[in-house]
Image: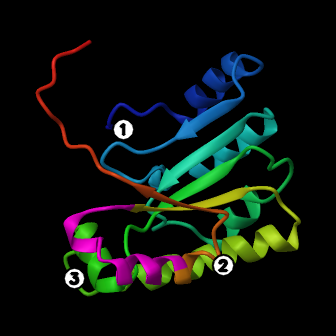
Amino acid sequence: KNNGLLTIEEYAALLDDLQGKTNMIDISGINTDPISYPYFYELISIIKEKGINFGIHTKGFNLNHNLSELLNSGNTEGSFVTVSMDCSDSKTYNLLHGVKNNINLFNEIIEQLLILKEEKIKRNSKFRINVTYLLFKDNSKSEMIEKFIEIFEPIADVLRFSIPQVPNKAKPI
């Protein structure tokens, strides 16, 4: 049915319970993108109405102008989006993100990030735009990293480079 997700009404009730008890809601996906949640816009609206800061971890596929306006509206201090790009070109993006055809999602996401940035400037918003780069063998050449910085530094507030950790057989502490 809903793959274990709460309904928007259930999230609203949970957020009522959390109001005043937390100052941050982290929104991420499990093998999916959180923005693909059918009521994502309403969820963000509810979180903002309750005055809770939020962070969104996304691949950016579903960013759009309406969402950019919402994210940059009202109190934005302490809230952010982190977009996983992990590369500096479309071919590497498709390889690392499992895109099976020649769709140019890389450039589409950059266009949506530029709209998000424009809204941020227009509204004098403090909403933070973070862009991440998970370092793998296929994307760790210095020229690729330098091109990533050149592309995303004008857009992002934070460029984050991450070292992946693979599951291991370590003993629990």
* Disc assigned to residue 154: 2
**Label 1, label 2: how far apart the Cα atoms are:** 39 Å
Query: Which x, y percent locates residue 144?
Result: 36, 81
Residue ID at (48%, 82%): 108
**Label 3, label 2: how far apart the Cα atoms are:** 29 Å
**Label 1, label 3: how far apart the Cα atoms are:** 28 Å
Q: Is residue 147 left or right of residue 11?
A: left
Q: Which residue is mark 1?
A: 2
Quadrant of the rendered structure where residue 90 is? Answer: bottom left
Is the magenta region chiefly helix, strand or loop?
A: helix
Query: Which x, y percent locates residue 80?
Result: 66, 51
* Disc assigned to residue 101: 3
- Nearer to me, 54 or 138: 138
Q: Start and end of the magenta stretch? A: 134-149
Which quadrant would the N terminus be assigned to in this image? top left
Q: Amino acid at mark 2?
A: Pro
Residue ID at (66%, 41%): 54
- Nearer to me, 151 or 63: 151
- Nearer to me, 168 or 76: 168
Q: Is residue 3 left or right of residue 126?
A: left
